[in-house]
Image: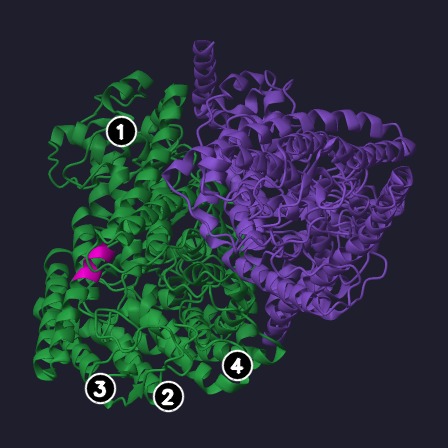
Chain colours: A purple, B green
Amino acid sequence: MDEDGNLQISNSNYNGEEETDPENNTMNQPLLKRHRTLSSTPLALVGTKVSHIESLDYEINENDLFKHDWRSRSKTQVLQYIFAKWTLAFLVGLLTGLIATLINLAVENIAGYKLLAVGHYIAQDRFVTGLLVFTGANLGLTLVATVLVVVFAPTAAGPGIPEIKAYLNGIDTPNMFGATTMIVKIVGSIGAVAAGLDLGKEGPLVHIGSCIASLLGQGGPDNHRIKWRWLRYFNNDRDRRDLITCGSASGVCAAFRSPVGGVLFALEEVATWWRSALLWRTFFSTAVVVVVLRAFIEICNSGKCGLFGKGGLIMFDVSHVEVRYHAVDIIPVTLIGVFGGILGSLYNHLLHKVLRLYNLINQKGKIHKVLLSLSVSLFTSLCLYGLPFLAECKPCNPSIDEACPTNGRSGNFKQFNCPNGYYNDLATLFLTTNDDAVRNVFSSNTPNEFGMVSLWIYFGLYCILGLITFGIATPSGLFLPIILMGSAYGRMLGTVMGPYTKIDQGLYAVLGAASLMAGSMRMTVSLCVIFLELTNNLLLLPITMFVLLIAKTVGDSFNLSIYEIILHLKGLPFLEANPEPWMRNLTVGELGDAKPPVVTLRGVEKVANIVDALRNTTHNAFPVLDGGDGDATELHGLILRAHLVKVLKKRWFLNEKRRTEEWEVREKFTPVELAEREDNFDDVAITSSEMQMYVDLHPLTNTTPYTVVQSMSVAKALVLFRSVGLRHLLIVPKIQASGMSPVIGILTRQDLRAHNILQAFPHLDKHKSGKLR
Amino acid sequence: MDEDGNLQISNSNYNGEEETDPENNTMNQPLLKRHRTLSSTPLALVGTKVSHIESLDYEINENDLFKHDWRSRSKTQVLQYIFAKWTLAFLVGLLTGLIATLINLAVENIAGYKLLAVGHYIAQDRFVTGLLVFTGANLGLTLVATVLVVVFAPTAAGPGIPEIKAYLNGIDTPNMFGATTMIVKIVGSIGAVAAGLDLGKEGPLVHIGSCIASLLGQGGPDNHRIKWRWLRYFNNDRDRRDLITCGSASGVCAAFRSPVGGVLFALEEVATWWRSALLWRTFFSTAVVVVVLRAFIEICNSGKCGLFGKGGLIMFDVSHVEVRYHAVDIIPVTLIGVFGGILGSLYNHLLHKVLRLYNLINQKGKIHKVLLSLSVSLFTSLCLYGLPFLAECKPCNPSIDEACPTNGRSGNFKQFNCPNGYYNDLATLFLTTNDDAVRNVFSSNTPNEFGMVSLWIYFGLYCILGLITFGIATPSGLFLPIILMGSAYGRMLGTVMGPYTKIDQGLYAVLGAASLMAGSMRMTVSLCVIFLELTNNLLLLPITMFVLLIAKTVGDSFNLSIYEIILHLKGLPFLEANPEPWMRNLTVGELGDAKPPVVTLRGVEKVANIVDALRNTTHNAFPVLDGGDGDATELHGLILRAHLVKVLKKRWFLNEKRRTEEWEVREKFTPVELAEREDNFDDVAITSSEMQMYVDLHPLTNTTPYTVVQSMSVAKALVLFRSVGLRHLLIVPKIQASGMSPVIGILTRQDLRAHNILQAFPHLDKHKSGKLR
């Protein structure tokens, strides 16, 4: 098998050798390969909606107009740009902080009154009424969340993190960062979390932060944009990318109250291109978020926030636990890491299957989506309410100075169906908000608070809920379900190890949660810092690092991270950082030959030809060639479809075939217009006499497109494409000869994806295994 | 002025326009521009030694041999590579941790016995003897450090961080990571720090970590390398870069016991190229360092380390301070930030001047270097011992439960010349190790421990020492001097604000130190995390972030960061991430014309021509052209100088002009040989008959060099060069015509540096000011 593979590769290389012979270049022998065509579908699943996706233009379009605009920018404008950039970063942080506070207040109050009412009936032993109220409230809240998502904004479903990751990789997904999406995400998230579903507000907050950033950058919702002059600098994909990175970091920060963790999350998980300048700016945004959160917590501590609890800046504070561990503790800690890796990858595997199944259900229509959500909500409510009856009542431990038993909204020792002086440990975990459940299971200095049977039930239930809840059509984060699952087996191990270890059981729960996160999401440094900032215990750091490293290593040996799996599932053409080894055995010339011939335009082109090119292709850019009257032998550059459409719409036609002056163009087009991305020209009617006129494309052409020589290997072309962040890469010939076109192909994101290449060149596949990073 | 500038630019652009006309291309009109030549000096100051520097080859040299080697790598070998990679990361962490412990133990014991002896004489009121012992010991230790550096390893002087930063940017500095340098750095660092000089072991530890990484990667010191087969995978600049990044992160971690801070420092300050995979690996290394440090601290806590103190994993623990701050506290905190920014940039400015002066002194010879060090040491000792006599004795505060007064090695309230029950606050800061001085000035819950006069003296002295100590020929870190200076004015402000603020004076000192670091070094996230991990108080985070952001903003408005200033001063050709705006107005074609014509070779080349090319140029690579018998019209690729030298040394000559078969090459060269970088061919004697023979360069040529079309702007070429991490960038013509060379130039790092371009094209300079990031 491996022998075969090597043989085949040698053959293909031998062909490559032949091609280096100038007498026998690839241009003359395409017949053999023409059947190998690169295909690509520009469709992907965004939220729960199938959308047409496009690539983003990060490359600076250096045409004459841009150059003039750039040169004419005064120092004042540069300062305006810098000022606006920082103001936006500030506003992103401020608004994300405010909205996060709003969501927290709403969830705590809605869920709080629900739980108080349920507690009221339970105290009177009216368990059935309690069940009806609990289930009814949860169904109602779920219904609101689902209907909003299904009717108004299908893109608001799920966490949104995979789509943001794709956006920052250069994939534009429509309606992802709009105002409707944001509002539905906020309200839907409040509803879904308050409904007690097994999902978090963390992922949605990241999406909300990104929406805020995008809306601020473009000056408001699509149809009501503020035409503020300073904002014109941000009307490009590069600055929007930076803003959205700030937004996602702010979102994580707001979710976990973890400023450094937010920055690192954006760096490690979300962003594809990173610069030191961005580190500083995202840090500024997260700092603002923290200040806002802190201010609100101060206000809430004085009791003005209704049922909002008395949390500090730290969510699950375990700083008062004295951390002591010795060489022996390395065994259970290693075990946690290994469990985390195995369970995490198993979770990824199963979730993948469930999402495929849910996709089939969701495709059947809106009613099916709503019914699916309601069924999950019903199941969740029944389990959360019913299962605590299985637990034995445990007597309160008088040596612990927390209130016991409690029957209010929160509290660590829920009385539920137990007599006074006793508590129900499962009710402590189930009949509460998810945040409080985590706080209870992390609670330290409360050894043996939870019985093993209860922990097994808790673990089992959240495994099931974690799998069935994520795919429903509501905003849903993955962090909290994983924390709940992980904390369960962590605490179990802690209870088992009780007599043999010096580590507190609450810390075991924390480590369990961290290990499952690492096993499923495969982040390391950012998770470590998030857990550090969540738990406020720096001495936990070395042990957390150890657990995370083990869990990630174990998980990586089984499958991809959950976000990568979701990206694949959704069909988002994510561009990986490392080329596959077999890409060294294919040249871009061969790849270009597998595509239809490139459509080029002349520097001064007939209108009819431009219309043809636009009508007959969906290409986003066309190489512009120059030369004498005969052959086009000079590469002038690359012109964007949007600019061609602009020319047609403005009817900037010439009667004769001539070059224009710079002022003629500047009179007709402003840089702001050219920054608009608009490529719909169905409503442009061009008369047949206009069809015979000419357009001078020179001033609108980007004269500096990136190029590769046809003998370049695909691996290195991919490195260039991905490092610089391109949308188009031109292939130029390696041989100098008259009459030859100076452009022999054009490569885009889809052409460079391993999956697509392997469909056209299946013989390369056999070498996929030997991956050398 | 600005008008002129715009005019000039328009002219130059007009020329550019003309050049796009195919009849009138740049090839035909070089006379006008030939006088503009790009010059570059391949010399830089490494440590205190002027060295010849080279660029590093990160690009994968895809020649036939490489491709064969790559293909023939089995799965086992891939696993070997991965295993070796992680083992090396583990060993880097382990050894860095061990050496850091060794340095700490040595410093604490040497300085401890010195201080004990001095304290002994002071207790007997024998102040002059005390002074003589103190000064003598310090001079002796300084002498050891300086002589080692001057005689054996001039590259071990200074912190080494700028050189590491340059290395990770692609600049190779000889003798920087050798065994001698490392040993001298270790011993010299112990000597210099124990001598009480105003310098830290932090910077040197980063360098030591990098040396360890480099030595491990190459299998030992230059002359005694282990020829372990698995190590051959690391004999390239890419893997070495990754290893050294791990090493520098481990060094920071070992210096500050700050694992996450170490990773972030490497990311934010040191590394130029960063990948997520690296984040994980550096994190692993720093985790190992922390475990080693922790193990040793456990051992030392049981008293087996001599005078080594009872420190925890946290160096300057302020976690027991309750952090409370309110809106009013924003004023002093802002003040600290502004002070930090102003003082930091002022420090950078003055240090620049001092380093220039020192450079003149150091150039005079080895004796001068030694005398300079000794003078600084003498001055330092006299001040540290003499100045405390100026302070008034303060009575011990019985409400503080620390021992007072003390007269031992460490301790917060030094008795010095005071009667019993009194302490000398300046002696507390001066007659101790630098680490203890920081600990004392950070000490919390000790309000008004230090008098204002004492703090002024402390601040003034460390400002002077901070400026005069850094440039001497010993290993010296910048972190500690800056922390000492910054903590002084922080504590002063805290003392002044005493009645009006809720923040502890110790925390003011911490914030002062942080602000000066940010003002001078301009790091943000990494500093924030380092301070977090140093002080173990997470609630300080928002306030630290705020201070750092202000200090950095203020500092940036004045000058560059200290490391960038040192990089410039040393002449290291660091490649910035962002192109200058005026680079958009220059094409690579124009830049190429300003260089001497490119020297090319034919695919099958005469030995004489190869020898000529090697003798007459210092180029590191030559384009290889192919074609019919007449014109060379096809670009085959790029061959490295080292490979040409290898061919000559091995005398792989052909009698006739023919292409070779793959097996012929493989018989002669192994991939390991080709990875060696050796370009000295003075000892190769070639007979005149051999001169007439041929060499087939095809199999050794990298067939996939990166190229740009001549009309590409320099700005975008620089983005490509820097993003992908290149050493050579070929310029290809934009026009297809027979008889034209397929390569019209070659660009290297020096050609793309703004400074060098401006020397050849001075008219672009006027636009330097309008910088738009």
Q: Chain of mark 3?
A: B
- Amino acid residing under circle 3: Pro
Q: Chain of mark 4?
A: B
Residues indicated by labels 3 and 2 sit on the same polypeptide chain = yes
As measured in the structure, the alpha-carbon distance from the residue carrying label 2 to the one carrying label 1 is 65 Å
Q: Is residue B490 above or below residue A403?
A: below
Q: Nearer the viewer, mark 4 or mark 2?
A: 2
Q: Chain of mark 1?
A: B
Q: Secondary structure at mark 1?
A: helix
**Where are the magenta residues, as a range?**
B103-109
As measured in the structure, the alpha-carbon distance from the residue carrying label 3 to the one carrying label 2 is 21 Å
Q: Earlier in the sequence, mark 4 or mark 1?
A: 4
> What residue is shown with label 4?
B332
Q: Is residue A85 among the parts visible in the rendering?
A: yes
Position of B42 compared to A162: left or right? left
> What residue is shown with label 2?
B452
> What residue is shown with label 1?
B672
Q: Earlier in the sequence, mark 4 or mark 3?
A: 4
User: Is residue A72 highlighted in magenta?
Assistant: no
> What residue is shown with label 3?
B419
- Amino acid residing under circle 4: Pro
Q: Is residue A431 above or below residue A586?
A: below
